[in-house]
Image (cartoon, rainbow, N blue to C red):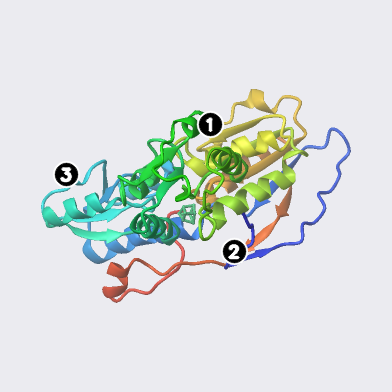
């Protein structure tokens, strides 16, 4: 899997400055926080509010972040679990994680007006499923059971897709023709663990095909590379992100595997348990792809108040990628791209 993708420039890593023992400092990962797909999805909801006024319904959390969801709720967004909860004829936005064709059909049957904020990189995986299902492949989708993205992706061809989450699942897979099998993946997995799962699948199915291009997206990959670059220097890595955010949870795991002595996931600075800081010199800070940077800045302020005021940014890539707004909003005469107000 490649770290450099269109829109990403690998950066020369400045050596992490060595500090005398006992120096309290923060290493701040870059890239971190909002990815292009999250920025686009949040702007789509904001534009929908601006153009059509509240209430705007959103199926599932638009992105997996408590602060974003709470802020949009205060502005008149109603989050629902299922399309059936949206009143007939109302406006509903589909989240960045994507939906299955069955959800689109249900929305049509209920005469809902829809804005599809599915990240284009998730749509890419949907298209791969369609293409390989048409070519009669068995598709082994590596991903986390119950995650919305996986449900939407598998829903493109439920008869052809089998989910592979754990190592145990590898043994349970049943394919019709071992020569015609392909693996695809959720976009927000751990790069290293996914490759482990692929190796296990390849042992069972030596002829298994690889995806035409990486399914784990540039943002997930880049955030993992950045946290790996600094983890071994850190006594503690704090990852800002919500517990239902797959890529945020992966950052905790990656930090620990890469040598951090401890790592925790927090939504807000106030959730840091001060006992975590006992005996800690270097604190690593990063955030998941659905996290506005204001939450990271709050955490840096909180740490500075407690003596960790020296901050060195550890940059492993510069991201320049932006996606145009969903088609439905472009048609409404709005501009594409931009940056969300949810900060
Ligand atoms: S994490 Fe990746 S796939 Fe998910 S919204 Fe962001 S860019 Fe898209």
Q: Identify the residue shown where x is 22% and y is 55%.
A: 104
Relative to residue 246, is residue 21 drawn left or right?
right
Which label was assigned to residue 84?
3
Q: Is mark 1 within 8 Å of ligand 1?
A: no
Q: Marks 1 and 2: which is nearer the front?
A: 1
Q: Identify the residue shown where x is 59% and y is 26%.
A: 273
In the image, residue 331 above or below residue 233 = below
Is residue 32 visible from the viewing direction of this image?
no
Q: CA distance from mark 3 to mark 2?
A: 38 Å
The x and y percentages for residue 309 are 72, 43
**First in residue order: circle 3 vs circle 2:** 2
Relative to residue 294, is residue 314 drawn left or right?
right
Label 2 belongs to which residue? Answer: 5
Q: Marks 1 and 3: which is nearer the front?
A: 1
Which label was assigned to residue 167?
1
Identify the image quadrant of residue 6.
Answer: bottom right
**First in residue order: circle 1 vs circle 2:** 2
**First in residue order: circle 1 vs circle 3:** 3
- Element at badge 3? helix
């Amino acid at each position: 899997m490649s770290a450099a993708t269109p829109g990403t420039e690998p950066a020369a890593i400045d050596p992490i400055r060595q500090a005398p023992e006992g120096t309290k400092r923060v290493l701040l990962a870059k890239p971190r926080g909002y990815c292009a797909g999250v920025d686009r999805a949040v702007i789509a909801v904001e534009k929908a509010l601006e153009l059509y006024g509240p209430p705007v319904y959103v199926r599932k959390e638009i992105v997996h972040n408590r602060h974003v969801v709470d802020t949009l709720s205060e502005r008149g967004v109603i989050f629902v679990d299922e399309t059936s909860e949206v009143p007939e004829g109302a406006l509903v936005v589909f989240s960045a994680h994507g939906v299955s064709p069955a959800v689109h059909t249900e929305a049509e049957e209920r005469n809902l007006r829809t804005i599809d904020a599915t990240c284009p990189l998730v749509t890419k995986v949907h298209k791969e499923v369609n293409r390989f299902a048409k070519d009669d492949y068995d598709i082994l989708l590596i991903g986390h059971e119950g995650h919305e993205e996986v449900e939407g992706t598998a829903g493109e061809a439920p008869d052809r897709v089998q989910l592979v989450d754990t190592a145990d699942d590898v043994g349970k897979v049943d394919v019709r023709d071992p020569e015609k099998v392909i693996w695809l993946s959720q976009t927000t997995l751990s790069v290293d663990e996914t490759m482990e799962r692929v190796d296990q699948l390849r042992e069972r199915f030596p002829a298994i095909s690889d995806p035409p291009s990486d399914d784990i997206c540039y943002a997930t990959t880049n955030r993992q590379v950045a946290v790996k670059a600094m983890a071994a220097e850190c006594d503690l890595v704090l990852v800002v992100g919500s517990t239902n955010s797959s890529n945020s949870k992966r950052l905790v795991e990656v930090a620990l595997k890469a040598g951090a002595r401890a790592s925790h996931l927090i939504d807000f600075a106030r959730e840091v348990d001060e006992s975590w800081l006992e005996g800690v010199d270097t604190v690593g800070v990063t955030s998941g792809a659905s996290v506005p940077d204001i939450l990271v800045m709050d955490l840096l302020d909180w740490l500075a108040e407690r003596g960790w005021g020296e901050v060195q940014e550890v940059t492993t890539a510069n991201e320049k990628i932006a996606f145009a707004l969903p088609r439905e909003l472009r048609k409404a005469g709005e501009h594409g791209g931009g940056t969300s107000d949810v900060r």
